[in-house]
Amino acid sequence: MRFDFRGVAAIGVAVASFCGAANAATFAEYEAVSNFGIPTQNIQWMNDGSGGTLSAVPPSFGASSNVRFSFLEGEAASYVVDVPALFTLVASSSAAASVSATGFVEQGGINGGFAFTYQGASPITFGGNTYTTGANLLSGDFTGARLYGVEGSPTAGVLDASTFGSLVFNSDFVSLDNLNGVRGLAIEMTSVSPFLSVVGGQLQDFGATSTGSFQASLLTPGNQGVVPEPATWAFMILGVAGSGLVLRRKRQQLQFAAL
């Protein structure tokens, strides 16, 4: 089965609509590092017969980082841009995977934690503080995350929000005490290999290249915004995945053309 990104890419605009409606902002994001212009595999799912484990893939070839990390909001956004980071993730689910009549895959009940630690050789100084290698760029714990995709496709996504699970963020670089209301994370996975497959209610092993973003809404009392349902989140991540793949391919083409 060949997954067609053309239709689903347009759904990515729904993410912007959500951010506006819920007063949510994407305050941080990451993307996989590349070797010779090709993004590396940095995430995997391992089936254990009664669910499975989602984890980050360690850097290869003796490298210290497997992602590039950026803050998009606040003072940190001027200093922490596309910095090398070590992405770690350990999460698991004991739930069975389901496949709808239209081939839509859902693996629910994913609980765990993640961290991005700074791996740059040079200290980062701002706001009167200096941050060195090993500093916590962003970490968090979550429950109730869900993995979505289309059976037989090379694209999937993991989503969580404080509206249908717990989600807590921590960071050495920014104060997150004022992140009230809606919080969310979205992990886009492309180049899923082998393609998504469910056998006997079990999501089968795969590796993938991931990028991701983290959202929070600074809501005032009485302005709680509109929170999307899990199914809506699922279509959002597929749209982001399609859009991200198209943009990365275009960027790579421009880079090669400049050589």
Image (cartoon, grey):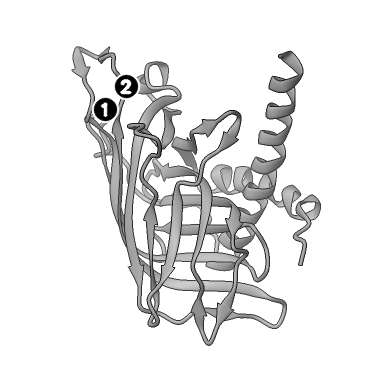
Q: Nearer the viewer, residue 193 or 117?
A: 193
Of the two numbered discs 1 and 2 in the rendering, the one whose residue sits closer to the viewer: 2
Secondary element type, mark 1: loop
- Residue 258 location, quadrant: top right
Q: Which residue in the structure is indicated by mark 2? A: 120
- Residue 144 is situated, as x and y percent measured from the top left of the image, at 38, 67
Between 26 and 88, the residue placed more toward the observer is 88
Give residue 49's position: percent from left, percent from top: 40, 81
Residue 245 position, x and y percent, is: 67, 42
Residue 165 sits in which quadrant? Answer: bottom left
In this view, 83 is above or below 7: above
> Quadrant location of residue 228?
bottom right
How many discs appear? 2
Residue count near mark 2 (Cα–Cα under 10 Å), binned few <14, some 14–19, many ≥20: some
Residue 227 visible somewhere in the drawing: no
How far apart marks 1 and 2 lie (CA) works out to 14 Å
Residue 173 bears which disc, if any? 1
**Label 1, residues with CA under 10 Å away: few <14, some 14-19, many ≥20:** many
Q: Position of residue 20 (x, y in %)?
A: 57, 42
Q: Residue furthest front?
A: 61
- Does residue 49 appear left or right of residue 102 in this picture? left
Q: Residue at x 29, y 29 (%)?
A: 118
Quarter occupied by the N terminus:
bottom right
Residue at point 51% right, 84% down? 201
7 or 1: which is nearer to us?
A: 1
Q: Report the amino acid beneath label 2.
A: Gly
Mark 1 / mark 2, whichever is N-terminal: 2
Residue at 59% of width from left, 67% of height from top? 231
Asked whether the viewer can see residue 236, the reply is yes
